[in-house]
């Protein structure tokens, strides 16, 4: 065994729990099982060989078949469970696959599901197409509802999905209040925790039963892989694991290896993303062209009190609402930027910007920002360089004016 896990679990008994930064380094690593090498290697494989017929019939082995796990996947599952405070974790080939499996593990035909209107848009598509086809009815709710979400519970409501802050629009949700209301009715609480990661929002300690992370984002940290994790509280772990085994939507070993590598530096990167994003957000908030900055860690944000109460940090993603202006002025701003790529996804080392419009697909709440809206991901570049680039963008905006 690695010496550090031994210290943690053993001997003295009253050992102080390890801090998150330490857990990121130690969790899921057992060098003594890898000939002393620091990292768990990439195990590729379908077939697992058994010593005799009897053991094969009983599937009596630590690893039984490639789809069910390898030492590589086990390392990340174990680490993620430890960091999340979960009973168990499964790995999926993308974040959206993780959302799909989490929902499949707790719903059946005839059930009703509540989803916030601010949800990541592909989640909405999944609910409105595949889940509907399998007889699950979805209602969208105002993400600001908190405990009042209970007023929307029907006799067949089975689960409440949450995401905080909301994708693109950054509304905060009162997750503990929603969880309390849901648990009073024995409903299951799911959360897409991709923005904060378990480092800044410990989902299960706040009442979430099934927490989803697009590992594609900050766990990768390099925009070079697709991966999803679902971690479960004790109550949901058996059904999650059984659904995973029944469907075998398993992640590829190279991607899992790269995610393990990213995991070890995730806190350092997140703290840097947080600091740079806040600096850029504050600078943008003071610009005459900007009407509002949507970032819950800013004191002026309507979700700030909830963020401060429940979260221990903010990542590098936020949005802005520009003052009323033609779209072509906003596009000129984006097109003039040289350090901000234009593209979906985020969480890598590089800065990104996209235009967006939530009005087109909301159904439970109105989205009326009164000006063009842009989402930024602040990467690991120098903040002074990023601000200089944004100044150039505003100059191009004025030229179109
Ligand atoms: C990107 C993202 C996902 C999906 O991740 P993929 O790996 O791209 O499928 C899910 N939820 C949120 C909030 C995301 O930003």
Image (cartoon, grey):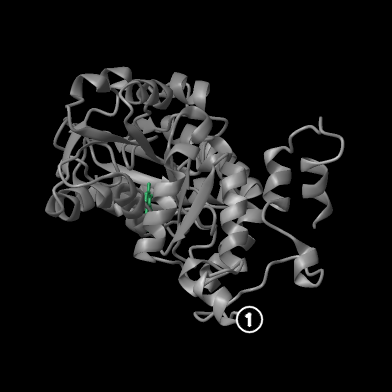
Q: Which residue is mark 1?
A: 51
- 86 versus 305 height, above or below: below
Q: Residue at x 41, y 64 (%)?
A: 93
In this view of the protein, which residue sits in the foreground, 274 or 146? 146
Horizontally, residue 325 falls left or right of residue 278, namely left
Q: Quadrant of residue 49?
A: bottom right
**Residue 5, position as x, y percentages in the image:** 77, 48
- 299 versus 98 height, above or below: above
Residue 116 in sight: no
**Residue 362, position as x, y percentages in the image:** 17, 39
Q: Residue at x 39, y 35 (%)?
A: 164
**Residue 233, position as x, y percentages in the image:** 48, 39
Number of marks present in the image shown? 1
- 197 versus 338 height, above or below: above
- Is the residue marked by circle 1 packed among few (<14), some (14-19), or many (20+) residues within 10 Å? few
In this view of the protein, which residue sits in the foreground, 371 or 311? 311
Residue 388 in sight: yes
Horizontally, residue 395 falls left or right of residue 74, namely left
**Residue 228, position as x, y percentages in the image:** 44, 57
Horizontally, residue 361 falls left or right of residue 291, namely left
Q: Residue at x 19, y 51 (%)?
A: 131
Q: Quadrant of residue 60?
A: bottom right
Say which quadrant the C terminus sits in.
top left
């Amino acid at each position: 065994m690695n010496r550090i896990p031994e210290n943690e679990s053993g001997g003295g008994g009253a050992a102080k729990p390890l801090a998150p930064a330490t857990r990121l380094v130690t969790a899921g690593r057992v060098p003594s099982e890898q000939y002393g090498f620091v990292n768990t290697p990439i195990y590729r494989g379908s077939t697992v060989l058994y010593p005799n017929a009897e053991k094969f019939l009983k599937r009596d082995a630590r690893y039984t078949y490639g789809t069910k796990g390898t030492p590589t996947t086990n390392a990340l599952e174990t680490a993620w469970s430890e960091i999340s405070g979960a009973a168990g974790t499964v790995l999926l080939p993308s974040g959206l696959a993780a959302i799909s499996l989490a929902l499949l593990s707790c719903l059946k035909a005839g059930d009703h599901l509540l989803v916030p209107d601010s949800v990541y848009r592909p989640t909405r598509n999944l609910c409105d197409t595949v889940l509907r086809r399998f007889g699950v009815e979805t209602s969208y709710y105002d993400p600001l509802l908190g405990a009042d979400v209970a007023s929307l519970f029907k006799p067949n409501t089975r689960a409440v999905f949450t995401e905080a802050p909301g994708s693109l629009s950054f509304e905060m949700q009162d997750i503990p209040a929603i969880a309390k209301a849901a648990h009073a009715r024995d409903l299951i609480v799911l959360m897409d925790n991709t923005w904060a990661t378990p480092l800044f929002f410990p989902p299960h300690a706040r009442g979430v039963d099934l927490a989803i992370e697009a590992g594609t984002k900050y766990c990768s940290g390099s925009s070079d892989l697709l991966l999803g994790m679902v971690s479960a509280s004790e109550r949901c772990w058996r059904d999650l694991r059984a659904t995973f085994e029944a469907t075998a939507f398993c992640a590829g070993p190279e991607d899992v290896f790269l995610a393990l590598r990213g995991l070890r530096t995730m806190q350092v990167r997140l703290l840097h993303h947080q600091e740079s994003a806040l600096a850029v957000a504050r600078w943008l908030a003071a610009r005459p062209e900007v009407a509002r900055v949507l970032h819950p860690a800013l004191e002026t944000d309507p979700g700030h009190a909830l963020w401060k109460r429940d979260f221990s940090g903010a990542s590098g993603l936020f949005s802005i609402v520009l003052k009323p202006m033609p779209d072509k002025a906003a596009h000129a701003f984006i097109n003039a930027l040289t350090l901000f790529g234009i593209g979906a996804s985020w969480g890598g080392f590089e800065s990104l910007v996209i235009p967006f419009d939530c009005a087109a697909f909301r159904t439970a709440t109105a989205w009326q920002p009164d000006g063009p809206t842009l989402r930024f991901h602040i990467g690991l570049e120098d903040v002074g360089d990023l601000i200089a680039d944004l100044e150039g963008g505003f100059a191009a905006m004025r030229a179109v004016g």
